[in-house]
Structure formats: C-alpha cells, structure tokens
Amino acid sequence: MSSAQRVIVGVSGGVDSAVAALLVKRAGYDVQALFMVNWDEDDNYCTVAADYQDARAVCHELGIPLHRVNFAAQYRARVFEHFLAEYRAGRTPNPDVACNREIKFGACLEHVRRLGGEVFATGHYARRVAGRPDELHKAADLSKDQSYFLHTLELSQLHAAMFPLAELRKSEVRALARAAGLPVYDKPDSTGICFIGERPFRDFLAQYVPERSGPIVTLEGERVGTHRGLAFYTLGQRGGLEIGGRAGHAEEAWYVADKDAARNALVVVQGHDHPALASTAIETEPAHWLVDPAPQAPLDLMVKLRYRQDDQACRVTPLPGGALHVAFETPQRAVTPGQSAVFYRGTRCLGGAVISTLQKVPPRPL
C-alpha cells in the first residue's frame, strides 16, 4: 500500500478514532477525516453535536480536513427498521452488526470513494494480516476485540478497510492520544449506539413497539406476575421482572427462560444456573462466511454467542439453504435468538449467522 494513497478516517469524536487518524497521518498517507451522523433526533441522549465538536478539535490538532455526512435516512431504512422488526418478533437484535455492514462499510465507504479515498480507516479493534487480504482476525487486545461486529462484511468491504489499532491495547491508545495532545485522550468510551445512548431502553422502545401485557409464568404454569410485552425482555434477563418474594418459592432471583408467543407469556425460573437457561445447540439463519467456498461439511470451530463472551467449542453442521446447526461442547447459558453466532479458528474470524432457534436442556415441559 503506497503512502501516496488517500486514506479517509472515520472520526467519531472518541479517543479510538482520534488515535487511528494520528497513526495514519504518521504513516505518511494523504489523510482526511469523515464524521458520520446516523441519528438526527435532537434530544438530551444523542451526543452528535458534542461529538462533532470533539472531532473538529482532533482534526484541528492533527491538521487534517474534516468532512461531515448525514446517513440518518439510510440508518433508519437499513438498520433501525430491522431493529424494530426483530423486537416486534420477540427477538433481541444486535444493531451494531448491521450498522457496520450497511452504514460504516456500506453507505460510508461509498462516500469515502466519492472523496477520492482508496482506503477507509476506523478505530475498530480488529486486525488484517499482510498478504492475506481475505482474512479478518482478532485484535491484539482481546478484551477490546470487535471482529464479532465485523463478521458480515463483504470481502470487497474488508479489502478497503484499515484498522490502525490492531496491535494496541486501550491503555496504549490513551497514552498515544495524551502524548500527541489530542483533547479526547481521557474521554469516556461510548456505552452504546447513539439512538439509545444512556436513555431508559424500555421507554425508548415503547415509542415504536406497542406494549402488550401478559402473564409471567413458571415452567409449571403458575402465574407469578405480569409483563409489559414480550419485546421488552430478553432471555437470561434478571432485572425489571417485578416478581418479588412469593410464598412457596425459594429466595433466589428470577430469570427469563423463554418467550411463549402463542400464549403471550413470559416464562421464568429461579436461579442463575437453572437448567432451563441452558442450550445444547442452536440453528441459525443463512450464514455469512469470510471463507470461499463456504463450508459444506461439519467443522469443529470456536464460537462467540454474544460480544464479550469467551470462545466456546462447537461443531458446525451446514444445513440446506445456508443455515447452520451448531452443537456446543458445553451447554451455553441464555443463548438469545436474534443475536449473532460468530465463528473462529484461532484468531481468524470465519463468519457468522443470526441465531434463530434453540435446543434447550432439559426439554421444556408442555
């Protein structure tokens, strides 16, 4: 890659993207920055205005031009509508996965090319390996690795990506920012996607998904409470059930074990490690693979069923139509339909798929 190439850096106003821009500039590239607006509601939770001012300050310090582009319409159409549809269906989606594919490396990458950029650099903690353009790997800092969120990229999108933070730990990123005089060196990390931010999630979701109350029941069918609507709960959830102590039951906390859409019932159990919270296998929607050709025979791989989870041993069996059956070596707690199962061999991310159905252990009582 020639240093004469134009690299556009996605600058969000945070320390990670600021240091990504710093490192790309130090490498001698023709560097410009791009600030994306993906949510345009003006309220006290979305921090676009403040983040843009931080991005401007960073780019001023680095002496690089900053462009601003609004993808709010594309975000609503390509990410947010799917997010709502999944919740209405009783599933728990991960919008960050769709945002990377559809916006950051979709609409944004198209804009990067309109700006004359050949490469799009971001502050993601992920890694590409020299001489192996089709491979996506975990970052050196496994506690910050974000390859999970990038597993649906097309190879053409991956080929255009640069991840300057690949070999750095977060503490090193902040130290570099401070030494370079970047004003965001101590800015707290973002805690979520902008349209949710720090706001109460249930209240936000209720603006778009109508409440439909129903019974909270035990596995045995005893009613122990009332829920606001299945969309407002996720498997393994403990808080917000408002069940409290009940005669004839232990003092242990209650957890969501299932959603029975036919009865509009939320099924709960007591105890963090109750067997009804465990799954031995899953089936998925059609998989997206970062390997060509896609696997046709069973594979023994490692899988993450949610971000931050340690890799888990599994056997992956392709099914007709591209879906997968994934059997776990050890039963997994609170596996959640709508989330992504992402597969690894060593540090290499091979692809993933959205979880559709669970095989529970033991089988749920009728």
Image (cartoon, rainbow, N blue to C red):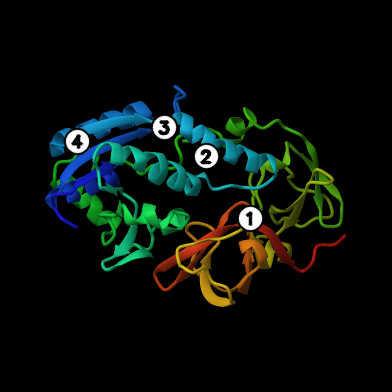
Compared with 119, 67 (above or below) is above
Q: Are marks 1 and 4 in contact (CB under 8 Å)?
A: no
Which of the 4 quarters of the picture holds residue 280? Answer: bottom right
Q: Sequence-wise, which precedes: disc 1 or disc 3?
A: 3
Q: Which residue is mark 1?
A: 336
Which circle marks residue 71 in the picture? 3
Which circle marks residue 59 in the picture? 4
Q: Nearer the viewer, residue 144 or 282?
A: 282
**Within 10 Å of the Cα at label 1, are there few (<14), some (14-19), or many (20+) other Cα atoms?**
many
CA–CA distance in space, label 1 to label 4: 40 Å
Q: Nearer the viewer, mark 1 or mark 3?
A: 3
The spot of residue 46 in percent (x, y) is 43, 29
Q: Sequence-wise, which precedes: disc 4 or disc 2?
A: 4
Q: Sequence-wise, which precedes: disc 1 or disc 4?
A: 4
Compared with 31, 280 (above or below) is below
Q: Sequence-wise, which precedes: disc 2 or disc 1?
A: 2
Determine whether the residue tagged by mark 3 lies in a helix, strand or loop.
loop
CA–CA distance in space, label 4 to label 2: 28 Å
Q: Are marks 2 and 3 in contact (CB under 8 Å)?
A: no
In the displayed structure image, the side of residue 331 where residue 79 appears, left or right: left
Determine whether the residue tagged by mark 1 lies in a helix, strand or loop.
loop
Q: Which residue is mark 2?
A: 79
CA–CA distance in space, label 2 to label 3: 11 Å
Which of the 4 quarters of the picture holds residue 169? Answer: bottom left
Give the residue type that dot 4 points to: Cys
**Within 10 Å of the Cα at label 2, are there few (<14), some (14-19), or many (20+) other Cα atoms?**
many
**Within 10 Å of the Cα at label 3, are there few (<14), some (14-19), or many (20+) other Cα atoms?**
some
